[in-house]
Amino acid sequence: MLTGGRPGPDGPPPAGRALEAKDLGVGYGAATVWRNASFAVERGEFVAVIGPNGAGKTTLFRLLLGLVPPAGGSVEVLGASPRRGSPEIGYVPQRHSIDYDTHVRCFDLVRLGFSGHRWGFPLSGRREEAAARRALEAVGGLDLAEEPLNALSGGELQRIFLAEALVSQPALLLLDEPLSNLDLRRSKELVALVHRIVRTRRVAALLVAHDINPLIPYLDKVLYIANGQIASGPPSEVLTSASLTRLYGLPVEVLHDSQGHLVIVGGEAHTETELGGGEGHHEGEAAGGVFRPPGGAP
Amino acid sequence: MSFSPDLVGDVQEMLRYPFMVHAFEAGALIALVAGFVGYLVVLRRSAFAAHALAHTGFAGGAGAVLFGVNPVFGLLLFTGASGTGMALLGRRASERDMEIGTVLAFMLGLGLLFINLYRGGVATATYSLLFGEILGISADAVVFTFEAFVVVVALAVVVYRPLLFSALDEDVAEAKGMPILGLNLVFLLLVAVAVSMAVQVVGVLLIFALMVTPAAIAVRVSKVPTHAIAIAVGVAVGATWLGLFVAWYLPYPVSFFITTFGFALYLLVRGTQSIARRLAVRGARADVAAPRPGTEPG
């Protein structure tokens, strides 16, 4: 079993592909979720994973985490077959068991991200405490370290989950719908934070989202899953009226404003504005996802 | 026994009776285990599962009495088997209220049948199973309790971190390679042993006085897991010893005093925190005279 070199605390991860899938398929029993998927993600790339509910986005993550075996084809994660428990993958699941009753320090959760999988009692926690502090610093959450989890807002909580995922110095981040409970401003802040981490640490990030507008300024690639297929491409190719309409099976329009920015209206990418239709002040912002070529400053 | 100002003399007097020494010793060991396991029960939201295991224990204890076996073996057998069954139900099995409730009802019925079949002192056997009999603990039972204590502590030291991790973030723990089903099984077996031990002190009906009340106080007081465990253990031991001490003077059941002290402390903590919060809100209101800058009107 390949483990790969673990990056040092500050050095960039080694070069090489983050993900490479060839004719990859996955299914539970006889049912295929998707198949014949071929795509690649480089280190330092920020990738949006989009697609309707039940298309197999979370299943893709579970496959990359080594929790679900592929049903066909091949996949390499950081140069090796997916294996469960790799410290090189940082994972933020969609589901969390934290609620208004969880009166536990943020610091302890982040620290568990580093050593929670180890058996036995910690003799000296200095190394893991330093790692937890570094991870909190990376997400701008040092001031939250002593706060209990149940006192945090949705945006703060997502930053803590991100720190928990970053604490083992991963080279690949898998973020499953981190924006689902955030308002537009918090979504944009979180996406900007992930983008900064992706660029400064040369980490590859896959982010599942239903509202793609906050992501548009930062994306290097879009992976879209629908109708048992996965396709990928640069945002300018994938984010077109024709491809998104095909993807969601609903009319979706991609509009260009006077400055060449891109706005997605309709389908699932537009749920937020549809639901908030009555709130006039909201609409201007919600439809204001803009796209500039990758690498451009937001 | 009437109250005298010479407390030290009274304690010396109490400790001249072997049954009191056994009660203090076994009570402390059981409270230590129940306080620790109780914290995990509260954090994993498995209070109903713990409740159900206690009721299963009733059937086991009653069955053992019927067949002339030491009740604690019947308790361990039934709670252990039920705990294993719950673990096999799958992920987050401890939250499956309907399945657990169904088994719980059947087990109580089974316990009733066993008691009905028993020809000896039905009332005494039932009463001690339901409400505990801390003053009836034999020297052998103390030794057995100590052995169980050592096993639980040894196991707890090994599995503490993964149990805490899976309680707070099960999906990430799974991705990190933790055996979630195995951890759930170990957790439920810990609860089973703790319940079987605690029945001697407070009985199946009052088990929460040692397994939930101290932990409920602890999670309100401390956000650091290790501190919270220390508080839960301290409250459990304190309530047990204080209950024994007070029952020396008053002609009422020890279990009643143990539950009452726990409950009184719980009310005190909630009341104090509620007042503190109200004062803090009033202070904050005085600070905020004008709306925050940057807040746009809806």
Image (cartoon, coloured by chain):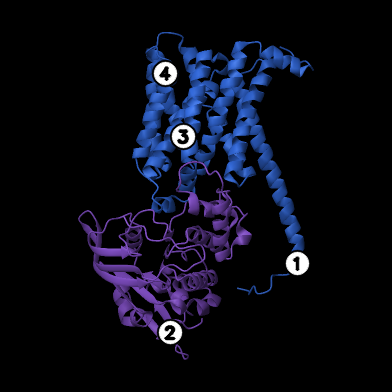
Chain colours: A purple, B blue
User: Looking at the image, which residue sits at the far top?
Assistant: B120
Q: Within 10 Å of the Cα at label 1, are there few (<14), some (14-19), or many (20+) other Cα atoms? A: few
Q: Which residue is drawn at 48% across and 31% down?
A: B152
Q: Give the numbered dot on residue B289.
A: 1
User: Is A284 located above or below residue A168 in the figure?
Assistant: below
On screen, residue B11 versus residue B107, left or right, reads: right
Residue type at tag 4: Ala
Observer-nearest of A177 and A242 = A177
The answer to which of marks 1 and 3 sits earlier in the sequence is: 3
Distance from label 3 to label 4 (Cα)? 28 Å
Q: In 3D space, how far apart are the residues under numbered discs 1 and 3 (Cα atoms)?
A: 55 Å
Picture layout, residue B194 above or below residue A233: above
Instruction: Say which residue label 2 marks.
Output: A293
Look at label 3 and name its amino acid.
Answer: Leu
The subunit carrying tag 1 is: B
Please identify, in this view, whether the residue under mark 3 or under mark 4 is nearer the observer: 3
Q: Where is residue A76 in the image (x, y as percent from the top left)?
A: 30, 64
Residue at the image point whose x is 73% and y is 69% from the top: B290
Upstream in sequence: badge 1 or badge 4: 4
Q: Residues within 10 Å of mark 2 (few under 14, many from 20)?
A: some
Same chain for mark 1 and mark 4? The answer is yes
**Outermost residue, right direction?**
B5
